[in-house]
Image (tube, grey):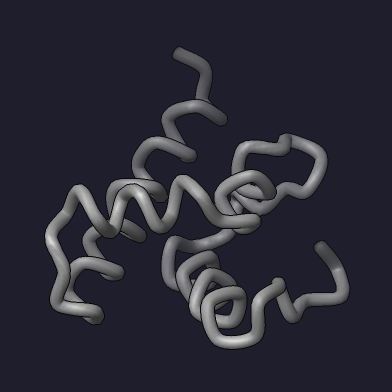
């Protein structure tokens, strides 16, 4: 497993935990929400460099996407 893959895997685990806790939903439901988001697609895209950001930063992007229907971030 590459370093990028490890960073993505750890970030996803942290983000899904945050979603589950904040929204008071089951882990599986939180995972489904995140995996079906635009942010998840961007996280997997090496070109965005999003995998280098903190899980908290990525989670904030996810919350923006859920609130506004899209990512509110010019650099992505």
> Which quadrant of the figure has residue 70?
bottom right
Position of the N terminus, as image quadrant, is top left
Point 55% across, 56% down: residue: 37
Point 66% across, 53% down: residue: 50
Q: Residue furthest right?
A: 74
15 to 64, vertically: above or below: above
The percent position of residue 75, horizontal first and vertical second, equals 85, 68
> Which quadrant of the figure has residue 16?
bottom left
Residue in the foreground of this view, choosing between 24 and 61:
24
Residue in the foreground of this view, choosing between 58 and 67:
67
The percent position of residue 29, horizontal first and vertical second, equals 24, 55
55 to 65, vertically: above or below: above
62 to 47, vertically: above or below: below
Q: Residue furthest top?
A: 1
| Count of picture labels | 0
Point 60% across, 50% down: residue: 52
Point 35% across, 49% down: residue: 32
The percent position of residue 3, horizontal first and vertical second, equals 51, 25
Position of the C terminus, as image quadrant, is bottom right
39 to 60, vertically: above or below: above
Residue in the foreground of this view, choosing between 10 and 19:
19
The percent position of residue 9, horizontal first and vertical second, equals 39, 36
């Amino acid at each position: 497993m590459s370093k990028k893959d490890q960073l993505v895997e750890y970030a996803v685990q942290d983000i899904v935990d945050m979603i589950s806790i904040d929204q008071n939903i089951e882990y599986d439901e939180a995972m489904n929400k995140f995996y079906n988001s635009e942010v998840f697609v961007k996280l997997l895209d090496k070109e965005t460099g999003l995998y280098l950001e903190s899980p908290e930063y990525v989670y904030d992007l996810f919350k923006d996407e859920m609130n506004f229907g899209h990512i509110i971030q010019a650099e992505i």
